[in-house]
Image (tube, rainbow, N blue to C red):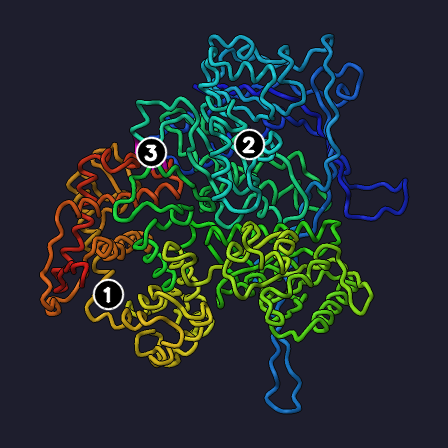
Amino acid sequence: MSKKILITGDLVWDTHIARLPVTGLGYFETHSHTQLVNRLGGAWYLRDVIQALIKAQNATMAKHISPDQTHTRESLAAEVFCPEPVEHSLVEGENCPSGIAKGFSIWKFFDGAKKTASAKILKGKKQDEEPTIIFKWPKGPAEPGTWRITEFLGCQAAVWNSKRPCPVVNNEPANPDVLVIDDLGLGFANHEECWPKCLREPQNFSGAIVVKGTPPFTSALWQKLLNPNLKLVENLTVVISVAAMRDMGATIARGLSWDRAIEDFQREYSQAGCVSMLRHCRRVVVTCGRSGAAVFSRCPRSPMEEDTKPSVLQFERFVFDPKYLEDTWSLQYEGITFGTGSLMTAALVGRELAGEKCQPSTHLTVSQGLLATRKMHQGGAGHDPDGFKVDEAETTVFSMDSNEKPSSSFRSAFPRDLLDSPILTAKSESESLLTDAVGSGRAFLMATAENIVRFGQEQYLADVPRLECGKYFTVDREEIENLNTVKNLIEEYRTGSDPRPLSIAVFGAPGSGKSFAIKQLAEAAFGEQRSPLENNLSQFRGLDDLHEAFHEVRDRSVQRQIPLVFWDEFDCKRNDLPLGWLQEFLAPMQDANFQANGKTHPFGKCIFIFAGGTKTTFKDFDRSGDEQDEDFRKVKGPDFVSRLRGFVNIKGPNPSGGQADEVSIIRRGILLRALIERHHPQAIHPESKELIIHPRVLAAFLGVEKYRHGSRSMEAIVSLCHLHGTPHLGPSELPPQEVIHLHVSKDFGEKLSGADYYHLLPSDVEKLAEIKHKNWWDGKAAQGYVLGDKRNDNSNPKTHPLCKPYNQLNGAGKEGNRLPARLAVLRLESLGYRIVRTDQVNGNAVTEVDEKEILKMAQSEHRRWMREKLINGWAYGACTSDDLLLHGDICKFPQLQKPEQKLDHEIIKAIFAFLTEKGLVLVKPSKGE
């Protein structure tokens, strides 16, 4: 039996005007092109989008669902009811029905991105032979041109007249399965005569409600929807945009980091937040452009919550694209498009049609909505400059190619309280999306860093938000937020009218890469052709040198450039006076001019980058708040700080702020891999991208206490390695010890020797992974599982696609066993154990791991598995389903069923079978050793 969807809300008659890519010869010249298209908008447009979704999903299901699953196919069969369309002549006439607003937009055909060829010059072999220029064209077609909106002209308000009724819904269902409301703030919400009967008299209405809402939520519609006595709110799903929340007064960071955005959303949805009136809804989805969406709900997230039924909204997930922030994906394409909220609303309606037992993880639903918004933006109103097809824009956005998965580009931030507390490490105070993805604590961070060096960052940081500016890459949250702040400042300054220099300070330890990071950021903003002006104040002899540098800045600015000027070591001494140069910059920073030889010389717009040389962080430099620091005030330090518009702290490979900065291990892994690729590309396998590096060398590079000169020290060691005749980086390929000691602390050599500590070789990892998989398979077989294409926990016999020998697993299946294998040794290390050869015990007693410690490692393994599932969008579900991203084991370890707990124990015990086979034992040295 088909379900009934009733769509209502604000109605709009949209007029789309096309600016054709031709030049007219005169006012009366005729065109064969379409110049103006009218189409139904608002709730009418939402109807079109929902029908497109149903059509696409039914087509997909017909291809992939077997005949014995017809009950699932039938669940998407639906009838759509909506107010009857109105003819154009009636809209423009005196008898236009009430409640129809009129919107206007101008469209333009934007040319696609042109792919340019790269030129390579080959010199002739003979002296008088002409060089040959070879052009290499990039693969694939150029980005097609697209019709997109260049300007919204606003909306003409609807006329409300009791003598001219609103358009009606023919055969309106009394109790629809899903009621969809498009509240655009154009009057529908306060005119009850336009509402369907199930909304006016909701006593017997029990269907789901999905509302695309516009704040403030104070209208008659929202008073009824949120009235707890009517119980409509218990089935209410609301879709709003982050822009709408900001209009309500919400403080939500824009374009800094997803970590910051998630924290801001959680605050705003707390009891004191600006959208607290929505706290009793069933679900709220907030769209963040085309790259993210926050999901809050009252639905159970674990077995523990099935009985308690949360009474208010709680954080369910945040779906995000690790590569892009709120607005950055759309910046690739000129022009704007509409429909983001409608597409997300349609995706949620499709979820409601599936029924409670078949509803997928919200990650799948929200990812589908976000992907549809991207397709809509890419496709616009068509790619034909002679064919303007705005009335067909939504027809294909929900269609999926055979290999396309809506969730593949997106990850999910999850509530951390779903996880057990860290078992083997203390709870980190700096939890982030990075530690959510790779794990919190040294063992997990070290395992990830090792994999980055061996295989590259693409695979092992795919789930982590990152910032890429040219050749600079970081996943450190603080660096991402600081650099994005500066990036946003530069973009606003370029297009703004402020004539004063944009002044930004950059701090970091020597060799941290602070200048490189800012230059890459500037190159991304200005292009490679704009070379920065670089000045080192420690080399200036006096004011004449400074004035000469100012004149060079002025020369650039009068040429209508915005020069980027580096003032390196701005905090150095001048005539033995600490920070003596600061006062010379006060007038240029504030008044956009400088004094020289009694004359005033004005600047044009320019960007000043002050790179510190004596302090590693802005906090260390700024002593404005210390009333006892007379020296800082005498050199005009507070005045200088007040003129800065932003700052950046670049951390580099050494821990920042002490050993608490565990993420420095990841930064080291990224830097080490990049340096090896730069200096020894022949050591990287051309296809697998694997680097063969000895475990002790890797442990020394990643675990050394300090690089004396930051990244310059790491580069010095890597560049001097002897890798020309071998693809293997081992101890013998490193430079001499006396050279190494110039750049690192003495523990580098101790870690490199590692005589009393066994490091797993790649072959060991493979063997341990095989044993681990066999233990798991034996446990699943004991539960009645056999090999099958898809996991099915309800069939007889039960099937699982990984129930096969290790050598028959695909790459992803094997890698899923290798990571726990690598972690096994690091977990033992966290418990204080060391692995040694039997003949190297040297008086230390062989130690057996007791059951309590095995339990800790089993809990840690379950936590790791949970993180992997949750960040890839899985959710708790009574019925496990790969297609729906649901799993019954997404719960804390104590709530896990006993057979599954036993599986985690068997996975851990694989390490002991491996040790026995390899002739290795465990020792636990005392603290004094």
In magenta, the rendered stretch is 875-881
Q: Earlier in the sequence, mark 3 or mark 1?
A: 1
Residue, disc 2: 52
- For label 3, count other residues whose C-alpha is less than 10 Å away and answer few (under 14), some (14-19) or many (20+): many
Closer to viewer: mark 3 or mark 1:
1
Amino acid beneath label 2: Ala
The residue lying at 27 percent from left, 55 percent from top is 823
Amino acid beneath label 3: Tyr
**Residue 254: x and y, percent?**
57, 42
Query: In whole angstroms, how far apart are the C-alphas of marks 3 and 2?
Result: 29 Å
Q: Earlier in the sequence, mark 1 or mark 2?
A: 2
Residue 347 against residue 774 in the figure, above or below: above
- Is the residue under label 2 in contact with that under label 3 (CB below 8 Å)? no
Q: How many marks?
A: 3
Secondary structure that dominates the magenta span: loop
Residue, disc 1: 759
Query: In whole angstroms, how far apart are the C-alphas of marks 3 and 1?
Result: 37 Å
> 185 and 366: which one is in front?
185
- Is the residue under label 2 in contact with that under label 1 (CB below 8 Å)? no
Closer to viewer: mark 1 or mark 2:
1
Disc on res. 876 = 3
The residue lying at 13 percent from left, 46 percent from top is 851
Q: Is residue 617 left or right of residue 332?
A: left
